[in-house]
Amino acid sequence: MVFGRQDPHVPLEGRQLIHGRLEAAGVNYEWHEVNAAHAFMRDEGPRYDPELARFGYDSALRLFRRALR
């Protein structure tokens, strides 16, 4: 899970709810919150952050490598 902390679509309360449910269900996951807005990984517009986008994509690729071998 990768969330931008300034994303109004998934505010802190929503992230806490998601996190709690994952923990309660015993799900194996990674959780990352970064100081970014909604759509910070989309390579257009003022919210785009290339370094944080790279972090998000690298995290996803690590997961795919582990899970899909």
Image (tube, helix red, strand yellow):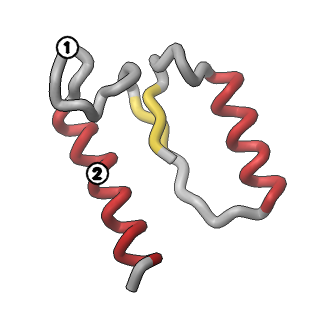
Which residue is label 2 attached to?
57
> What residue occupies the far right of the structure in this picture?
24
Which residue lies at the image location 63% right of the left edge and 23% below the top edge? 12
What is the three-letter code of the residue carrying label 2? Tyr
Q: Which sits earlier in the primary sequence, circle 1 or circle 2?
A: 1
Residue 48, percent across and down? Answer: 22, 25
Quarter of the figure with residue 68? bottom left
* Above or below, comparing residue 25 to residue 48 in the picture: below
What is the three-letter code of the residue carrying label 1? Pro
* Above or below, comparing residue 4 to residue 18 in the picture: above
Which residue is label 1 attached to?
46
**Kind of element beneath mark 2:** helix
Quarter of the figure with residue 50? top left
Residue 11, percent across and down? Answer: 60, 19
- In the rendered view, does 50 fall on the left or right side of 53? left
Which residue lies at the image location 77% right of the left edge and 63% below the top edge? 26
- In the rendered view, does 50 fall on the left or right side of 12? left
Which residue lies at the image location 18% right of the left edge and 16% below the top edge? 45
Residue 8, percent across and down? Answer: 52, 14
Quarter of the figure with residue 63? bottom left
Is 16 in front, or is 44? 44
Q: CA distance from mark 1 to mark 2?
A: 19 Å
Whether residues under marks 1 and 2 lie with C-beta atoms below 8 angstroms apart, the answer is no
Which residue lies at the image location 47% right of the left edge and 35% below the top edge? 3
Q: Quadrant of the C terminus?
A: bottom left
Is 6 in front, or is 45? 45
